[in-house]
Image (cartoon, grey):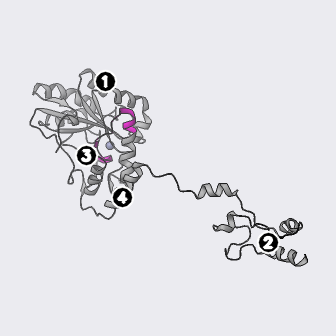
Amino acid sequence: MKTAFLIAACLLLFPCPASGSGPGEPAAGQGAIQEAPPPAQAPPAAPVVRRKVRYPEPQAPAAAIVRAAAPKAAPGPGQLRKKQIVAAYRDRAPKDWGERVAGVRTRLDTAEPVIALTFDACGGPRGSRVDNALIEYLRKEQIPATLFLSGSWIEANPAVFKALAADPLFEIANHGLAHRPASVNGRSAYGIRGTGSVGELVDEIEKNGRRIEAATGRKPKFYRPGTAFCDEVAVQVAGELGCEVVNYTVLGDAGATWPQEKVRQALLRAEPGAIVILHMNQPRSGTAAGVMEAVPRLREKGLRFVKLSEFPLR
Ligand SMILES: [Zn+2]
């Protein structure tokens, strides 16, 4: 009986010599999730010995550990797609950086007398306002337009966003989640750092695209990077996500920095098929007034206004 007791005590003192784990440190091995069963012949005194030698207790019930060890939920189709795109483009080094790199669309592919007005809403601390006079004018004059909205602008203007998304006069396009230049390696434009990798770029496009889809029922197929700068690999990545990168034929307000007269002059230079880039987030700029002056003149010239989706782009 005494011998059996000693054996039991030894087993409890050194319960799992192969695991290598120290006292109080539940190991990943079997020893951590299973209490050593008392030897079959152990005397009734054995539990008392156990308490004295401070056998390391598992810190969580075995069932909880089994749950934690179970495989995680399968990644959704979006995550899988992102993985595939990252794997395919990770090692591609871009050669060009700018607003018109290979693959960027800059005009409507038509000879019809049409012009596409596009208005960006960039978001951020100084870019989250709404040019209500401009939007009211477009509505009053029934001028269709494509609106490139960033995620941060949408966040700052949920009610306006909802109303614009519900208005068939407008087409909502993607201006990036955080208005970052579209880079696969972190290049900057105007002091704004571009997305730092293929994965970051996918998020910049896709997360805002899904937000817009939730409101409009359609995932936007046009994407304009924050600042309009991109590299040619980024353009291909956008293509993998079902987006055309769209910049412009005519610079309409230079980031909403031009006065009314300069905006008017720029718009009057627009030829059939032109895509004009303007802004709808700077009510104190000359943009709205310049547009109001130019639109009647353009109409007199026989031009009409269309959304980007009405024609193929090139
Ligand atoms: Zn912008």
Residue 62 location, quadrant:
bottom right
| Residue 12 - label | 2
Q: Amino acid at mark 2?
A: Leu
Residue 23 showing in the rendered view: yes
> Counting residues from the N terminus, which is met first, the one under dot 2 or under dot 1?
2
Q: Amino acid at mark 3?
A: Glu
Q: Amino acid at mark 4?
A: Val
> Counting residues from the N terminus, which is met first, the one under dot 3 or under dot 4?
4
Q: Residue at point 24% right, 23% down?
A: 142
Would residue 118 appear left or right of 152 to someone viewing this image? left
Q: Residue at point 28% right, 23% down?
A: 139
Extent of the magenta region: 211-227
Q: Is residue 98 above or below residue 113?
A: below
Q: Quick check: is 214 in the magenta stretch? A: yes
| Residue 86 - label | 4
Q: Which residue is mark 1?
A: 136
Q: Which residue is mark 3?
A: 244
Q: Nearer the viewer, residue 130 or 18?
A: 18
**How far is the residue under mark 1 from the one under mark 4?**
42 Å
Q: Quick check: is 29 in the magenta stretch? A: no
> Counting residues from the N terminus, which is met first, the one under dot 1 or under dot 4?
4
> Counting residues from the N terminus, which is met first, the one under dot 2 or under dot 3?
2
Q: Residue at point 67% right, 75% down?
A: 20
Per the image, label 1 sits on a secondary structure element best described as helix
Per the image, label 2 sits on a secondary structure element best described as helix
Residue 252 showing in the rendered view: no
